[in-house]
Image (cartoon, coloured by chain):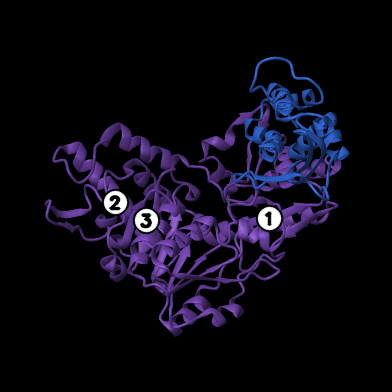
Amino acid sequence: MSFDVAAVRRQFPILSQIIDGQPVHYLDNGASAQTPEAVLDAVRTYETTSRANVLRGVHRLAERATEAYENARVEVADFLSVDPMEVVFTGGCTAAINLVAYSWGSLLKPGDRIILSELEHHSNIVPWQLLRHRSGIEIDVVPVTVAGRIDLDALPRLLTPRTKLISLAHVSNVTGTLVDVHAVVTLAKTVGAKVMLDGAQRIPHGPVDLAAMGIDFYAFAGHKAYGPNGIGVLWAKAEHLEAMPPFHGGGSMIGRVTFAETTWAPPPRRFEAGTPPIGPAIGLGAACKWMRTLDWKEAHAHEMALVERLMGGLQKIDGASLFGPASTQNRYPVVSFLLEGVHPHDVAQTLDSFGVAVRAGHHCCQPLMDRFDLDGTTRVSIAPYNNNTDIDALLTGVQHAARTLR
Amino acid sequence: MTDQLYQDRIVALAKAKTGAGKLLAPTKSARRDNPLCGDRVVIDVKLDNGKIAEIAHQVRGCLLCQASASALASVAVGRNAAGIETVRMDAERAIGREEGEAGEPFAAFAPVKSHKSRHECVLLPFEALKEALS
C-alpha cells in the first residue's frame, strides 16, 4: 500500500487554507510543524471538559486533568520506548537542554570537558557556554565535513579522561544529516562519557527507541512534532535524573518545605516546578499518539521521494547548489540550498509570494555558517503531509528569484 | 505570485552598489549585526568638521539591506549626524514607521511597508552609521 498523502493532509485544517488566492505550501516544518485535528481535539477536550490544575486538587476536574497529563507522559514514553518516569515535561527543547546543562552540569568539576559539534543549534551551544562560565568546564568541538556531516573520524582525538559528555544534534536542522549514534556511544564509552542528543529534528519523523540507543539524555520540542507550542521533553536515564539537583524551585517539585530545609520530589516531578503546561503536554501526548498511526516506513519513503524531487529540480536551476549531502542516505528531509547572487532571505521572500513557506538565514547555527563562510542558506524542511505540488511550487519560485533578483 | 516587494527601483539601488567597499583610512567605522537574520553591515566614514566627507559600506545581507546602504551612501556626503537623522526619517516614512511622505531616494522602499519582518533590513545601515557618527 502506498502512502496516502491526501488522507494525511485532510487531517491538517491549516493546509486547506487559501491565502491571497494561493494554497499554503508549508515547507518550514523544521521551524514549527503544523497540527492535526487529533491534537487540536485533545487540547480542546481538556480545555472544555477537564481544565484544572494538576496534582493538587481533589475535585473531579482536577482528577481528570491530572489523569490526562500523566497519560500524555505515557504516550510520549511509548513513542520513545522508555519508562514514563524518565520523561520530564519542559517548556521546549531549549529548556530541556538548559535543564541538563544547569542541573547535571552542576555536578561537573572545573576542567571537565564537553564535546559539541560545529553544526549544533545555538540551543546546544549556549547553555554549555553558560555552564563553562559558571563552572570552569571546557568545550571541545567536533568539526563538520564538507558534506555537512559531523566528522566522527575526528572525535577520538578529542576524547580525554576528563570528557564527561558528548552532546550532538540527532539530525541537523540545516543539512538534515543523521548522526551515527552507535559510533558516538561506542566512542563515548571508551572514556566513560555520557551522550546527549538534541532530537528536535528527528522526532517529527517517527518513533525512536532511546533505550536501545545506549544514550543518556534526549531532548525535543512539541511544536516541531505536530504538537502545541510551549511544551518539550527531556528524557534521561533514571539514574541520572535521580542524581540531578532541581533546576527551578517552586510548587510540585518538593518533598517537604520548611525555612530550615527543603527536600525534593522524586523525578520527573523534581524538574517540573510550578504549574506545568498542562494543555500543551496533553496535546503533545496526542501528537505522539497520532504519529504512531502512520506507517513510518512509507512516510519516510514519501518524504525522501520529495527530497529527491527537490534536489533534482534544484540541479536544473542555474546558480542553485545544495548545502549538505546530495545523497538521501542517512539523512532526514531537511535540505538547505544556496542561489548564487541572491541572498537567502530574498529567496525566501520571493517564495512567500508563491505561497511557499521556508526558512532562510543562519538557522541558529552561526558557527556552522562561519565554518563555510556563508551568510545563510534557504532551508526546505518536509513533513509527511507535503506533496509534489509543494515542491513544484517551490522550484517555480526559486526559478523566478534566479531570473529577477540578480 | 502575489507580491511586488522586489520592484525595479529597489533592485536597481542594490545593483548600483553606491559606496560599496571600504575606506583606506576611515575616521570611524562601525559594524552592526541583526541577530535575528544574521545580516551584517560595516560602515566606514571620513569626517570633516563632523560632516561626512567619504562613506563606504560592506553589506553581508539581503537585497533590501544592500539597497538601503546604497541609497544611504548616495545622500550621506556633506551631512552630519543630524542630517543623517533627517534621511533616516525618510526611510522610516517609506516603510510606514513615521507619518508623511518619504523623500528620495528612500521613497523607493514603500513596498517594504507591509513586510514588517523586513523593516530592520532597511534600517540596519542607519544603525551602523549612527554608531560610526556617535
Parent chain of label 1: A
Q: Is residue B35 above or below residue B87?
A: below
Q: How many marks?
A: 3
Question: Which chain does the purple colour mark?
Answer: A
- Mark 1 or 2, nearer chain start: 2
Q: Secondary structure at mark 3?
A: helix
How far from the left and from the top, in percent, is residue B81?
A: 71, 30
Residue at mark 3:
A76
Residue at 72% across / 26% down in the picture?
B91
Q: Quadrant of the C terminus of chain A?
A: top right
Dot 3 amino acid type: Val
Residue B14 coordinates in the image, percent (x, y): 82, 38
Closer to us: A337 or A257: A257
State the image quarter where residue A264 is shown.
bottom left
Are callouts 1 and 2 both on one chain?
yes
- The answer to which of A384 and A335 lies nearer the viewer is A335
Residue that numbered label 1 is attached to: A336
Q: Which mark is residue A71?
A: 2
Spatial CA span between label 3 and label 1: 30 Å
